[in-house]
Image (cartoon, helix red, strand yellow):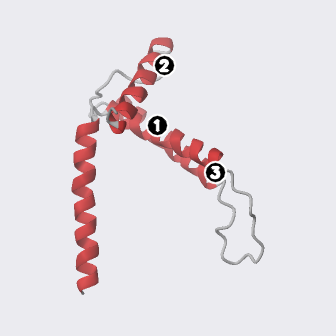
Amino acid sequence: MRDALKTMFELRQEFMEQLRANDPKSYPPWPVDVAVRENQQALRETTLRGVEELFEALQHLKNWKTHRADTNENFDREAFLEEMVDAVNYFFAVLILLGIDEREFYDSYIRKHQIIMERLENKTKS
């Protein structure tokens, strides 16, 4: 089986390339020069779209209010997951625009995981 993270990056990039072919203003050519104002604006806009999708996912969580006695048993897992996938797609787009590939992202993820695990371990020792 192919590496799942690599496949996800490839699929998002394929989508972005097709979107750019249909609408050249949808994304700037990548990797972007972050020093250019318009590129920072594109990165910000794409990131905010991902955040909007996270908020849409949160709307499916109905039982988070601790002050409410009643509960809502309805949870549309499929709709929640779809919104989470939408959010991840926008975040992948930001990484692609920056020229970050799956290897660099994975390596950074592992480094950060080690840091937070060390923090957790040190906290439990205190």
Asked whether 75 or 84 is in front, the reply is: 75
**Tag 1 secondary structure:** helix
Dot label at residue 119: none
**Tag 3 secondary structure:** helix
Q: Earlier in the sequence, mark 1 or mark 2?
A: 2
Q: Residue at x 33, y 32 (%)?
A: 2
Q: Is residue 39 above or below residue 23?
A: below
Distance in Å between CA atoms under marks 2 and 3: 29 Å
Dot label at residue 77: 3
Q: Is any part of residue 63 visible from this angle?
A: yes
53 left or right, relative to 105: right
Q: Is residue 76 above or below residue 31?
A: below
Q: Earlier in the sequence, mark 1 or mark 3?
A: 3
Q: Is any part of residue 37 visible from this angle?
A: no
Residue located beneath label 1 in the image: 89
Q: Residue at x 76, y 78 (%)?
A: 69
111 left or right, relative to 28: left
Select label 1 or label 3 by which is in front. 3
User: Which picture quadrant has residue 73?
Assistant: bottom right
Residue located beneath label 2 in the image: 19
User: Which picture quadrant has residue 52?
Assistant: top right
Asked whether 94 or 42 is in front, the reply is: 94
- Kind of residue sitting beneath label 2: Leu
Q: Residue at x 25, y 72 (%)?
A: 119
Q: Position of residue 72 (x, y in %)?
A: 75, 64
